[in-house]
């Protein structure tokens, strides 16, 4: 993955469609959790409690706790925060 620049719209869109398992146009907390755990597993990484807390806080911060989850724009911000924290 590239460092120091944003995910492209196309990358974010592809990821959004994959993570939105029930296809309702928003990413719920459960959908986010499933996707991230599967991703971490594919990289041989075990997600710590601290990481989970951080991810949940970030998800909420980007709008995940209203309207049933993150919409595509909110997800784009979330994905960038996760890919390039700090
Ligand atoms: Ca969904």
Image (cartoon, helix red, strand yellow):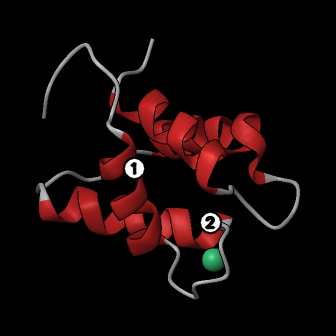
Q: Secondary structure at mark 1?
A: helix
Label ID, residue 27? 2
- Mark 1 vs mark 2, foreground winner is 1
Q: Where 49 sits versus 35, above or below?
A: above
Q: Secondary structure at mark 2?
A: loop
Q: Quadrant of the C terminus?
A: top left
Point out the residue furthest to the front here. 10
Instruction: Sort mark 1 into few (<14), some (14-19) or many (20+) by Cα contacts within 10 Å.
Output: many
Sequence-wise, the earlier of marks 1 and 2 is: 1
Q: Where 52 sits versus 41, above or below?
A: above
Q: Quadrant of residue 41?
A: bottom left
Indicate yes or no: mark 2 CB to ligand 1 under 8 Å.
yes
Label ID, residue 57? none
Asked whether residue 22 appears in the rendered view, the answer is yes
The foreground one among 45 and 73 is 73
Asked whether residue 36 appears in the rendered view, the answer is no
Q: Quadrant of residue 72?
A: bottom right
Residue at mark 1: 12
Q: Residue at x 38, y 73 (%)?
A: 18
Q: Residue at x 34, y 62 (%)?
A: 14
Q: Residue at x 44, y 71 (%)?
A: 17
On screen, residue 85 versus residue 4, left or right, reads right
The percent coordinates of residue 65 (x first, y second) are: 83, 53
The percent coordinates of residue 6 (x first, y second) are: 34, 25
């Amino acid at each position: 993955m590239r460092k120091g620049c944003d995910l492209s719209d196309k990358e974010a869109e592809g990821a959004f469609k994959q993570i939105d398992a029930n296809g309702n146009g928003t990413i719920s907390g459960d959908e986010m959790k499933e996707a991230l755990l599967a991703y971490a597993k594919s990289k041989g990484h075990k997600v710590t409690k601290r990481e989970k807390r951080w991810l949940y806080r970030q998800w909420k911060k980007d709008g995940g706790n209203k309207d049933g989850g993150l919409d595509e724009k909110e997800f784009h911000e979330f994905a960038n925060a996760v890919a390039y924290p700090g």
